[in-house]
Image: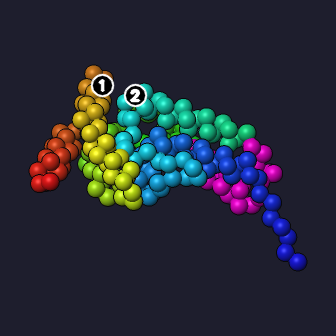
Amino acid sequence: MRSKRVTNQPFNSFCDASFAQLLALAPEVAGELGVTEIGTIRMPQNKFSDYSEYGQQQRMSAVRATLATLEGYDRDSLSDDEKMTYDIYRDFLYNGRFGALLGVNFAPTLGAEPLLNHLTGIQAEAITFLTEWHSFHDQQSIEDLLQKLESVPELIDTLIDWQKEQASQNRLTPTSILDRVCSETRAFLAIAP
């Protein structure tokens, strides 16, 4: 005789909803994962992550709140599969480093994380998000892309502000990386529509 499996619906609902909320604060991550919605929550595809200090603090606060709620669940009362979900999610919330989403152990480095680098800087993420990760499946997704394109100047302004802040703290991006980033950006802008 097969035993009936009991699940903790509030725990599973919390995991789905909280992960959706975190991904909504980091649209590039959702795009890279190919996730357009979780349950009834549609992932925003019409904007980039907010890389300003406020945006970084907002994501970190959300990660901390999610971790506190997760740790409020009695792990021993969960099924084996749910325990695995708990452990993986908890590790991610502590140690994750996925695009704009950083685990709480990275809190001391907020603001010092390199937004520009030659492999995974914002300039590379933005181009990839626009050209490869954006999901086209309905009229709304096309409108989302056009809205995201309109926000590129704001994204560039955020990068400039970040670079100025880094310079004021004597944390300078190496010239070789700046040259590469500028070269990549010029090459992208040179592509005929």
Q: Residues within 10 Å of mark 1 (few under 14, many from 20)?
A: some
Image-quadrant location for residue 182: top left
Give the residue type that dot 1 points to: Glu
Which residue is at 25% across, 31% downward? 157
Q: Nearer the viewer, residue 185 or 43?
A: 43
* Drawn side of residue 113 relative to residue 13, left or right: left
> In the drawing, what numbered circle is on residue 83?
none
Amino acid on which disc 2 is placed: Glu
Query: Where 80 sits versus 38, above or below?
Result: below
Q: Position of residue 24 (x, y in %)?
A: 48, 43
Residue 183 rendering spot, x and y as whole percentages: 14, 47
What stretch of residues is rendered in magenta?
Answer: 73-93
| Mark 1 vs 2, N-terminal side | 2
In terms of depth relative to the viewer, which is nearer, 110 or 4? 4
Residue under label 1: 165
Looking at the image, residue 116 sits to the left or right of residue 39; the answer is left
In the rendered structure, are the residues bearing label 1 and label 2 in contact, judged by CB atoms less than 8 Å apart?
A: yes
How far apart are the two marked residues, 1 and 2, measured between alpha carbons? Answer: 10 Å
Residue projecting furthest to the bottom? 1
Q: Which residue is mark 2?
A: 53
Vertical placement of residue 125 versus 84, above or below: above
Q: Where, quadrant-wise, is the C terminus in this rendering?
A: bottom left
